[in-house]
Amino acid sequence: MNAQLLAAAAVIALGLGGAASAQTMKVKPGLWESTIVMTGPMASTRTDTECFTDGEWSPDDLMDEETSMCEPTNVQVTDNSMSFDLACTANGMNIAGDMSYKSQGESGSGKMNVAITGGGMNMAMSADMTAKWLGPC
């Protein structure tokens, strides 16, 4: 399941990540296909598949494991939804964003918004995420 959010490239491409959250939402284990549509300067569409086996998902699953500059705040988790904010400074850039995701059993959708300022640059990006369960792994 993390592929459906991992590709929220606005966060990953900027080297953010490493959230530390014990809060999780429930997801159906199995093979998931996800599509992320990015708008802004990094506009792109990406579709991935990933086998998700443990039945839970947390903000950690969005973040790139190789980085650890930002922590999620205002984390809100229920059995089928999650939202959180991000704010940090990395490489002289201020990064602020928010993310929300809702699972509907065998499908899910979410949105991420990120604003980056610093070094004379102001950039805004967003990502719309959709996912669907394909079957067992």
Image (spheres, rainbow, N blue to C red):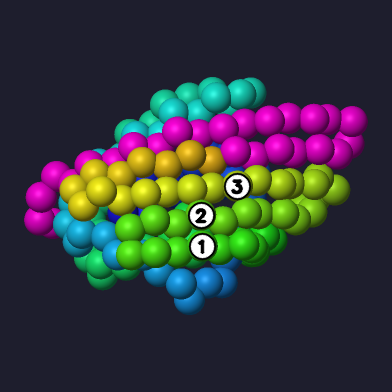
Few, some or many residues within 10 Å of mark 1 (<14, 14–19, 20+): some
* Secondary structure character of the magenta stretch overall: strand
- Residue highlighted by disc 1: 76
Residue at coordinates 48% horizontally, 76% vertically from top-left?
A: 22
Q: Are marks 2 and 3 in contact (CB under 8 Å)?
A: yes
Is residue 129 rendered to the left or right of residue 69? Answer: left
Between 33 and 97, the one lying in front of the other is 97
In primary-sequence order, the first of circles 2 and 3 is 2
For residue 30, what is the image quadrant? bottom left
- Residue highlighted by disc 2: 83
Residue 92 position, x and y percent, is 85, 48
Q: Are marks 2 and 1 in contact (CB under 8 Å)?
A: yes
Compute the Cα span from label 2 to label 3.
7 Å
In primary-sequence order, the first of circles 2 and 1 is 1
Between 125 and 18, the one lying in front of the other is 125
- Residue highlighted by disc 3: 98
- Image quarter (top left, top right, bottom left or bottom right) of the C terminus: bottom left
Residue at coordinates 42% horizontally, 48% vertically from top-left?
A: 101
Residue at coordinates 27% horizontally, 60% vertically from top-left?
A: 27
Residue 3 is at least partly visible in this image: no
The magenta stretch spans which residues? 113-137
In primary-sequence order, the first of circles 1 and 3 is 1
Is residue 119 rendered to the left or right of residue 44? Answer: right
Secondary element at image label 3: strand
- Identify whether 17 is placed above or below 132: below
The three-letter code of the residue at mark 2 reads Ser
* Label total for image: 3
